[in-house]
Image (cartoon, helix red, strand yellow):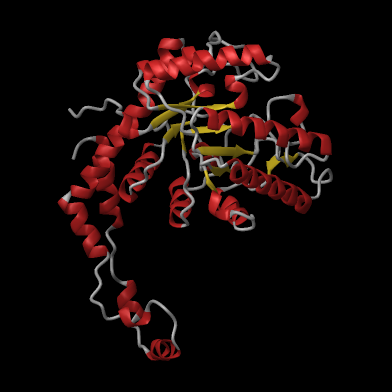
């Protein structure tokens, strides 16, 4: 059996809000006690994680005094030094406090919008203070329950103005920082703006500094509405915009479950891991999930180890897929190209178009060819099931 022990080069990270989740849900009180940020860093050190990420208020409570904040940061910094963990990413909580009930950057109230920008500026400073190189924006309250309440085009403009402001701030401060936008179709609002990774990619092109801004796709957010997550990740990668990624699992058509990575759709998880490893993605593998409500903190460690172990198992399965002679022979057969059509592809020319228009195709002969995808998919399943 291979060694599935996490190592720093795997870049596995967790948020303070993930392993620190107390197991509260809309129908039940917390089942786990609260731990300090420093205690959670030590917990992640025990399970051999690479890094820890945070919202501003995961680390510093929203009403903390300056003295309290400094003491928390001192303990957190010591825990990082003791464990060797790093902080690759940070973000702002713009969804929990009642002030954000109608959004943050897109709120109809200008005082809320100004406060949200102020809060984010301070949170960016905090993230940079601990070494974060990626800053994520998840607009959890940027949406509506009734479209009578808000003009959608105005909300888009307000959001754009805010992101442009933060880009200029980072440049002015000399921060080595990239921004990553995280999409979600709904929840906690009835509908959220920019609900998918594709929407975010289009929005980025309208910004003043698109080179500074990419995406942070989350598996559960896209699975909620039945989207193929790997396809969205591939689009982000091909566009040069995959700045960060959130790994978890999710049943389609349900609330945001944030299940342990690979615990629901192992096939989707496999194709995602295979994609990331095949293209050489070098960023963090961030697990934005939490343990079942049934668990104590030993169970939380089991959850964290499970996320990382499953990724490493699937990484090994991806290598097995790539080395399997029958699978590779099938792929070679499926993608066979005798070069006869190569003259028609690539950059347009009038001559090429006219020649292609004159080309004769035997549609029936082409259509009669079996592609053997059934066999290919079965071989994939057998690799995943451990019988090949």
Q: Is residue 260 visible?
A: no
Q: Determine which quarter of the picture holds residue 257.
A: top right
Image quadrant assignment for residue 238: bottom left
Q: Looking at the rendering, in which quadrant would you find the C terminus?
A: top left
Pick whichever, 175 or 194, lies toward us: 175
Identify the residue shown where x is 27% and y is 45%: 380
Query: What percent of the width, then of the height, locates residue 66?
Result: 67, 16
- Residue 30 visible in the snapshot: yes
Q: Residue at x 53, y 12 (%)?
A: 36
* Residue at screen point 66% across, 34% down: 120
Q: How many marks?
A: 0
Q: Position of residue 199 (x, y in %)?
A: 60, 52
Q: Give above or below for 186 relative to 32.
A: below
Residue 171 image offset from top left, x and y in percent: 59, 46
Image position of 8 with respect to 213: above or below: above
In screen coordinates, is 207 left or right of 281? right
**Left or right: where 139 falls relative to 375:** right
């Amino acid at each position: 059996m291979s060694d599935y022990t996490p190592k720093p080069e795997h870049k596995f990270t967790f948020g303070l809000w993930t392993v620190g989740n107390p197991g509260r849900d809309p129908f039940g009180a917390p089942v786990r006690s609260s731990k300090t940020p420093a205690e959670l860093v030590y917990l992640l050190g025990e399970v051999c994680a690479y890094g820890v990420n945070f919202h501003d208020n995961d680390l510093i409570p929203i009403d903390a005094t300056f003295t309290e904040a400094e003491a928390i940061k001192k303990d957190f910094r010591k825990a990082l030094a003791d464990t060797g963990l790093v902080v690759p990413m940070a973000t702002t909580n713009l969804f929990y406090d009642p002030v954000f009930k109608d959004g943050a950057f897109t709120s109809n109230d200008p005082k809320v919008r100004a406060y949200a920008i102020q809060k984010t500026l301070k949170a960016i400073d905090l993230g940079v203070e601990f070494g974060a190189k990626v800053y994520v924006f998840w607009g959890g309250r940027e949406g509506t329950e009734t479209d009578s309440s808000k003009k959608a085009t105005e909300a888009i403009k307000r959001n754009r103005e805010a992101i442009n402001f933060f880009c200029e701030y980072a440049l002015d401060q000399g921060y080595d920082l990239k921004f990553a936008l995280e999409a979600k179709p709904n929840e906690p609002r009835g509908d959220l703006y920019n609900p998918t990774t594709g929407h975010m990619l289009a929005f980025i092109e309208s910004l003043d500094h698109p080179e500074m801004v990419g995406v942070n796709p989350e598996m559960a957010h896209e699975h909620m509405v039945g989207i193929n997550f790997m396809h969205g990740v591939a689009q982000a990668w091909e566009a040069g915009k995959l700045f960060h990624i959130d790994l978890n699992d999710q049943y389609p058509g349900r609330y945001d479950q944030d299940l342990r990575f690979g615990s629901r759709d192992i096939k989707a998880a496999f194709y995602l891991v295979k994609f990331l490893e095949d293209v050489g993605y070098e960023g963090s593998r961030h697990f934005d999930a939490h343990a079942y409500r049934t668990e104590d903190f030993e169970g939380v460690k089991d959850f964290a180890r499970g996320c990382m172990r499953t990724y490493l198992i699937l990484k090994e399965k991806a290598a097995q897929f790539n080395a399997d002679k029958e699978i590779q022979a099938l792929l070679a057969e499926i993608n066979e190209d005798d070069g006869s059509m190569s003259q028609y592809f690539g950059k347009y020319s009038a001559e090429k178009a006219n020649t292609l228009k004159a080309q004769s195709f035997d549609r029936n002969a082409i259509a009669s060819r079996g592609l053997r995808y059934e066999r290919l998919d079965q071989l994939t399943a057998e690799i995943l099931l451990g019988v090949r």
